[in-house]
Structures are given as C-alpha cells and as structure tokens.
Image: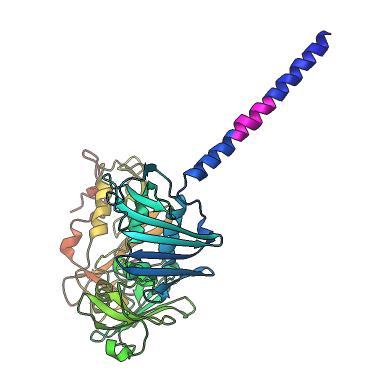
Amino acid sequence: MRFRTTLIVALVAAAFGAYVYLHEVRGGEDRARRRAAAEKLLGIEPASVTAVHITRSGTRFEFERRGDVWIILQPTPAPCDPRLMAAFLDTLAAARREDEVGGGDLVRYGLDSPAAQVEIVTGSGTRKLALGRINPLQTLVYVLVDDRKDVMLTTSALLTQSLNNAFGWRDKRMTDVDPDRVERMEFRTLTRGSLVVKRTARRAWHVEGPIAWRVDPVHAQNLLQGLARLECVGIGAEHKVEVNKYGLGTRRFGALLQAADGSALADVVVGFEDGHGAYFGMVPNKPEVFKVDGRLVNAWFELVGEPRDRKALPPFLPEKIDRIRVRTSDDTFELRRLSAIDWKVAASQKVDSTFALAPGSVDGLLTSLATLEVSGYPDPQPPASTYDPASIEVLLYASGEQVSGIEIGTRDPRGIQLIARGPGEPAVFHISPAAMLDVPFDLERLKAEGEPGPEGTDRG
C-alpha cells in the first residue's frame, strides 16, 4: 500500500513538473517572444522589404530592391547606398513602441504636417509611418502607424535617417578595393609629371625608377586608403556625355592602383576644379561624373613633388622593439628588453651581461632614432664604397623580426654630411653629424651611474 501511495505521489509530482515546464518555462519564453513582437513598431523583417517611399518637404523619394541591389527611382534615378539602406531597414525592424500618447492634439506632436512620411512595401502589403516632432529629450519621435490616430513614441533615428537628402541616399563609392591587394600606385599630374611607387618585400613603398627612394610611409598609406575606398563628395553630371567640359578628355591627371600581376584595381581620372574645393573625376564602369575631395588630389600632387621619406629609419614603434644589435669599429653588442624601461646587455665584445644600463637610456636611444631626420639627398648617388660596408650598423627587432635600422657610412667626399641608408636599401641619403650627437651608439653613453666604463673607453 505504501509503495502504491509513493508511486502515485511521484506521478503527480512528475505531472506537475511537466505542467510547470510547459506552461511556465517554455510558455514564459513564448509569451516573452510574443510580448517583444507586440512591442515592435511594425514587426517586419528587412529581407521582406521590396520598396521604400519617403516624402519630406514636398519631395518624394522612391527606392526599389532589385535582387541584392537598391535603386533610387526618384527624384533622380541612381544607385542607392546599400549601407545606408541596410541601416535604415535595420532601424525600422528594431523600432519599438516606446510609449503610447493616445489620440491627443496632432498639432502638438507635429503630426498635422509630418516631417516625413514613410511607406514600406513588403510581400504582404504596405505599412505607413507619419513622423512628427522629436520629444524634448531628443531621443524619441512622435509617430502614427498606418491609418490609426493613436500617437506613439519610437526611436528618433527613424526620423534622422528619413531626412537624408538625395545625395545622402545615393551610392557615393567610386572605388571599392582591398588595400592589401594593391602593390603598385601610379600618380599623374599636369605640372609635376608622374610618379610610380611599388611595395617592397617588407610592405614598405619605394619609388619605381633609377633611384628607388623610400617613400614617406604615412603619405603613401593615406593615399592608398583614400583611393582604394574612394567616395565622391558630389555629382558633376549623371552621364559622361561632355567629359571635355570637365577636363576629363585626357588621362593626364589621375591615379592608378594595380595588383601584383599588373591588373588595374582602380583607375581614377581627374579634371578641372569645381571652384568649391573639389575636382571633377570619373572611374570606369560608372556613368557619373563625380566630384572628388580636393584634399586627396592635392595629397597625391604633393607626393609626386616630393615622395622621399624625411625619416632616416624605416618606421617603427619604439615600445615594440625588444632587441637591438649594434656594430661599430669598437664593439659589436646586442641589447634585449626586460621590461618597459629595463634592458640588458645580451652580448658584447667589451662587457658581460652584468653591465648595468641606465633606466630609460635605451628607450631614449630608440626615440632619437625614430625622430632622426634626413638632412638631404645626394645627387648623383655616391659610390658604394662610401657606405658599404657601413662604419656603424644598428638593427632593430620586434618579436624576432628585423623591422628597422640604419647603416652609416663615411663622410660625403663633397662635404661634411654623413652617408647613410636603411638596412640594405638601394638609395642613400645624408645625415648631419650634429644630429648624430644625440644618438648614442656605444655602451659608455648608455651605462648606469657608477658603472665602470667598457674596456678600452679610456683610450686617448
């Protein structure tokens, strides 16, 4: 009897547990989902939208999805910016009924004459929004949904995005290239000639020509990023009918980005200035005459005029350097980083590893090297005997890889400047002897206070 009672109690408990799970746990999740869906302003999915119509300030904007592409049909037929439309649809899908104001006075909420009216066309019908004033906190906007007269509050981002002008909605991309694929850049100007720069094995940029100067890396990288993802700042004409009118009849002014195999990745042709800080420009496969930001065009004009890097060493981050190798006529030594400010002598011909370096002295050396500037460029280039082999060689490493350094040769036979170059680079430059006074290349000048000098430093 007792066993039967226990069994009945167990079955009742199991049934009760199942009821709680189904009706409270799973049922609670379902109710939460239904509640969240009910709180959505429209409850639509971005993928279901086939067209969007926006009317504001008397202008009607019509957008239509064609496959994976959005097109502007009105006021001017043109490609639509897919990123902007995706952001708008995501905002629309996520928009919630933040509060219900009730019928109220439409004038009070700016809904007697809405700032924007939006129609969203899906496969199941058309939904409508009338967007009025933004609330005092500037976070929500008063809205009417479909033909109902109940005023609600929803995210003000909907109104902000709906107020984009025609240029804001259109696709402004002139080029869309992965910058890492670009191995060669050609810049053409009308008055300064042309310049071609190529990547090296270490991903630096050098001039393609008789003298392979190292190019200012910041300047080159900024131009690469700007041209690879170039966006116009305006539209000069919708079609390339009268290109000569915009100075685009020749290819004498422009920029070309190429891959390693020589194929063109982006080809930008530039013409006249528009009088407002931009240049007219065009690219293949797009019908518009665009307007290109004048600052970008001026930047490549300046690079053509002076492409050479003013920094003596290839760029590096001093805090990333963890090993330094120095070779001079008096010593060959290696320094290794122990911490943010502490270094040790890992090898030397004159001292052992107990030799104490002054805290911060090695980082001071790195700072001096990072800011060391070229004083001039010899023309013509001096003979190899003036820099190979180098009288001083400094190599900088980070995580086991050589990232920078400098090789200093003899004095230029025609003056007092020193001949120098980046490690193994084909072009040399001048370094002022005065600038070298701030760059300690010997352990004597790096030692801690009270540390005996390295062997031989007391020689007269």
Closer to us: 69 or 396: 69
Q: Is residue 348 visible?
A: no
Q: Residue at x 29, y 50 (%)?
A: 109
Part of the protein shown in magenta: 17-27
Residue 428 magenta-highlighted: no
Q: Give the camera-side residue of 448 and 78.
A: 78
Instruction: Let me know if residue 22 is in the magenta part.
Output: yes
Residue 291 left/right relative to 86: left
Instruction: Check the picture and name the quadrant holding the N terminus.
Output: top right
Position of the C terminus by quadrant: bottom left
Question: Residue, x 43% and y 62% (percent of image)?
Answer: 119
Q: Quadrant of residue 386?
A: bottom left
Q: Please provide percent x and percent y for residue 38.
A: 50, 44
State the residue in front, 456 or 98.
98
Between residues 359 and 204, which one lies in front from this camera angle? 204
Snapshot quadrant of residue 8? top right
Q: Is residue 36 above or below residue 416?
A: above
Residue at image location 69% in from the left, 28% down from the top: 18
Establish if 82 lies above or below 294: above
Counting labels gives 0
> Main SS type for the magenta part?
helix
Q: Is residue 61 visible?
A: yes
Residue 84, given in percent of the width and then of the height, sits at 40, 62
| Residue 99 position within the rendered picture, expressed as x and y whole percent measured from the top left | 38, 42
Q: Is residue 287 above or below residue 323?
A: below
Q: Residue furthest top?
A: 2
